[in-house]
Image (cartoon, rainbow, N blue to C red):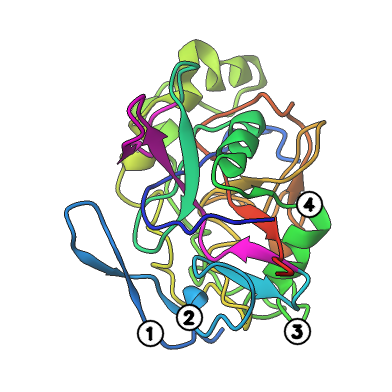
Amino acid sequence: MRVLPMVVASLVVSVSHDSPGALSRVSPLAVSFAALAPGGAAQPLGPAATANKSPCPRDMVSINGSYCIDAYEASLLRVMPDGTEEAWPYYQSLPASVVVRAVSRAGVFPQGHVSGLQARAACARSGKRLCKPAEWTAACMGPEKTVFPYGNVRQTGTCNDNGRSGMRFFNPQLDGKPEHLWMWGHGGNMNDPRLNQLAGTLTRTGERSDCTNAYGVFDMVGNLHEWVDDPEGTFQGGYYLDTHLNGDGCHYRTTAHPITHYDYSTGFRCCADVDDD
């Protein structure tokens, strides 16, 4: 399968909410090259995209030569009718009329507010696919097969697992009373574009530089939930407010939402088959 090389964009989406009672089901390598961001500024792609001695494109890494996975959580590029592309705002939901494709890039905010169906389509437009659940978990655990990318014991803040709650900040009327749980999704609260723009919530891809493993993948625990290839709807890894309720670290798995669901916490990354040519 031919995989198109990627350079820019920003994307994210997934969900295991910070609502009370809600269902939520290491060493970096050296940077050796840069990608051009919009405007021509050089942007280091970081450890994950280097020393990639595999048939994978350089924005992906090889997992034991079996498949390729994006080094970073996905960003989105909007594909215009004339074929030109522009970065899609990471904090905005996707209208049906907007065509996007996924890219893997360091130093940007990943795309949230994306459904599993939208994530699958965005990967396909870049010649990639959603990762199978087992592929995602293996890439997260690294060759050492640890619970977290960096080891077996959680180190708070190594990954983005200690963020603040934008839902509570922008909706101070929310509380933990059972009779008020409905308010967490009322009026589109969980797709408020302000949520992931609040300081102390979402972080840029690769910003937590120790949230990686020897494969060179970043941010697989925390930051955003990541959709995987399950027609029933599954996202993995947790997000910036929860990497524990539905399993620890790389074993975090939420199956409480259909593949059509999206909110501020849902994102993704892509996989691809290796090119045998």
Horizontal side of residue 184 vs 106, given as left or right:
right
Nearer to us: label 2 or label 4: 2
Q: Say what secondary structure mark 1 lies in.
A: loop
- Mark 4 or 1, which is nearer the eye? 1
Mark 3 and mark 1 lie on one chain; the one further toward the N terminus is 1
**Relative to residue 156, is residue 244 depicted above or below?**
above
Residue 243 seen in the figure: no
The residue carrying mark 3 is 144
Q: Tell which residue pokes out farthest to the top in this image.
A: 187
Q: Residue at x 54, y 33 (%)?
A: 114
Q: Return the residue at label 2.
A: 50
* Residue type at tag 1: Ser
Relative image position of residue 51 (x, y in whole percent)? 52, 85
Q: Is residue 174 magenta?
A: no
Magenta part of the chain = 67-93
Q: Earlier in the sequence, mark 3 or mark 4?
A: 4
How far is the residue under mark 4 from the one under mark 1? 29 Å
- Mark before the other along the chain sequence, 2 or 1: 1
Amino acid type, residue under disc 2 in the picture: Thr
Residue denoted by label 1: 32
Q: Residue at x 38, y 67 (%)?
A: 207
Q: Secondary structure at mark 2?
A: loop
Give the labeled residue for mark 4: 132
In percent of width and height, residue 133 lies at: 79, 52
Mark 3: few, some, or many residues within 10 Å (few <14, many ≥20)?
some
Looking at marks 4 and 1 on the same chain, the residue that comes earlier in the sequence is marked by 1
Q: Nearer the viewer, residue 252 or 205?
A: 205
Q: Are marks 3 and 1 in contact (CB under 8 Å)?
A: no
Asked if labels 1 and 2 touch by Cβ distance under 8 angstroms, the answer is yes
